[in-house]
Image: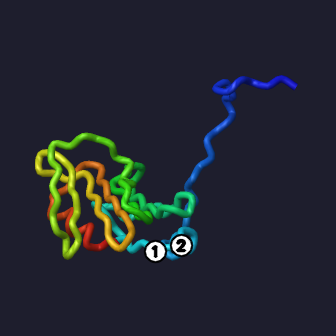
Amino acid sequence: MATLPPGNQSDVEIPNPFTDCDTLADAAREAGFALTAPEEANGAADRRIRVMDGKMVEVIYYSGEDETARIRKAPGTEDISGDFNEYAQNDTIAVGEVEVTMRGSDDMVCLATWTVDGYTYAVSVANGISSGDMAALVSEIH
């Protein structure tokens, strides 16, 4: 039996760490913690709910085929956004009693991150929104 050296196995894929869930309640059972997220985000109501390796809950919002927003929650304090872009603006504001870091440019916010009660959160939006709209979205997430 012939074997291919590493890197030459065209039919080998990295296992998908995500499990799709029908509801946020299903995701909470899978992950062991709950995420409260709005029914609609950044103008889109179609959403995909999934859990990564039982360690992170993610909700992706779509308008047609286009992703409009992504919300994530995981235990700990690490940045879970997956967004490694450099932004011209990096501000920390209070949303309720939570300090939220908002990143973006030209007065449009593309990413918000915060930590509360042992969990870290991230919200990213496709085309940027005002800081007021991002604060309103963040206030709906627990």
Q: 62 left or right of 31?
A: left
- Where residue 84 appears, as percent x and y from the top left, is 33, 43
Q: Residues within 10 Å of mark 1 (few under 14, many from 20)?
A: some
Measured along the vertical axis of the image, is residue 109 above or below residue 21?
A: above
- Where residue 60 appears, as percent x and y from the top left, is 41, 58
Residue located 62% across and 46% down the image: 15
Q: 27 left or right of 120?
A: right
Residue underneath mark 2? 32
Residue 34: mark in rendering: 1
Q: 97 left or right of 79?
A: left
Quarter containing the N terminus: top right
The answer to which of 37 and 53 lies nearer the viewer is 53
Badge 1 amino acid = Ala
Residue located 39% across and 74% down the image: 36
User: Separation of disc 2 and disc 1 at Cα?
Assistant: 7 Å
- Where residue 130 appears, as percent x and y from the top left, is 15, 58
- Where residue 62 appears, as percent x and y from the top left, is 39, 56
